[in-house]
Image (cartoon, grey):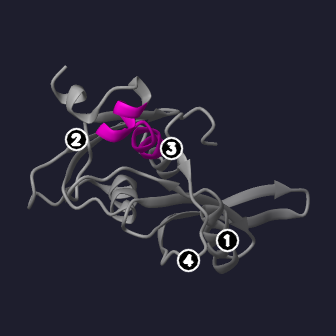
């Protein structure tokens, strides 16, 4: 899932104090000749609230096992996100399907100005001050993936300096 992002640093779940947050549970129906077969699909975000976050999808015939499967899937997809003083390094847009998400760093004391699935992801990452706008589709699956798209494109000044082969001072004083 994260192959197209150069700066995406995958993280192992061992030794991390991960908290899981349920984004949404959907009841899905499959119509067969014997009637309707009901199932559940759950999307979960896990994070240590210190820059490590992952998202997962679980499907099952009952809610509890769908959530458990989603948590296991999320722990397999953990990535590190750069956070600077409780906010983001820079503004970033993300998109997935019909969902568009814009996340903007904010001054200390602003809080997390975000709604629905975007708020869940940003709180799991550990961002305390951020402005965001979600546009287009409000489907939680796509909004979570669009938020991850934006977060995975974030780069801090040290990474940019290393990529360009220049010193940290030259990044700001170029």
Q: Which residue is mark 3?
A: 142
Q: CA distance from mark 4 to mark 3?
A: 30 Å
Residue range highlighted in magenta: 146-162
Q: Nearer the viewer, mark 4 or mark 1?
A: 4
Q: Is residue 132 visible?
A: yes
Residue 97 lies, with reference to residue 25, above or below; the image says above
Q: How many marks?
A: 4
Q: Are marks 2 and 4 in contact (CB under 8 Å)?
A: no
Q: Quadrant of residue 159?
A: top left
Q: Quadrant of the C terminus?
A: top left
As helix, strand or loop, the secondary structure at mark 4 comes to: loop
Q: Secondary structure at mark 2?
A: strand
Mark with earlier residue (4, 3): 4
**Residue where numbered disc 1 is placed:** 66
Residues at marks 3 and 1, CA–CA distance in whole angstroms: 18 Å
Which sits in the foreground, 140 or 119?
119
**Labels 3 and 1: the sequence-earlier one:** 1
Q: Which residue is mark 2?
A: 104
Q: Earlier in the sequence, mark 4 or mark 1?
A: 4
> What secondary structure is found at the residue carrying circle 1?
helix
Position of 168 with respect to 49 (left or right) is left
C-alpha distance separating marks 1 and 2: 33 Å
Q: Is residue 17 magenta?
A: no
Quadrant of the frame with the N terminus: top right
């Amino acid at each position: 899932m994260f192959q197209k992002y150069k700066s995406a640093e995958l993280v192992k779940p061992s030794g991390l104090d991960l908290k899981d947050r349920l984004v949404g549970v959907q009841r899905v129906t499959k119509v067969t000749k014997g009637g309707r077969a009901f199932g559940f699909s759950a999307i979960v975000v896990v994070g240590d609230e210190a820059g490590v976050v992952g998202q997962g999808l679980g499907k099952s015939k009952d809610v509890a096992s769908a959530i458990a499967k989603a948590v296991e899937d999320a722990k397999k997809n953990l990535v590190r996100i750069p956070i600077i003083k409780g906010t983001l390094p820079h503004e970033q847009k993300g998109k997935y399907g019909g969902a568009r998400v814009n996340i903007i760093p904010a001054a200390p004391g602003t809080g997390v100005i975000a709604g629905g699935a975007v708020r869940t992801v940003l709180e799991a990452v550990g961002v305390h001050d951020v402005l965001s706008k979600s546009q287009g589709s409000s489907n939680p699956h796509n909004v979570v993936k669009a938020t991850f798209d934006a977060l995975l494109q974030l780069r801090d000044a040290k990474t940019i300096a290393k990529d360009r082969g220049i010193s940290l001072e030259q990044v700001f004083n170029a």
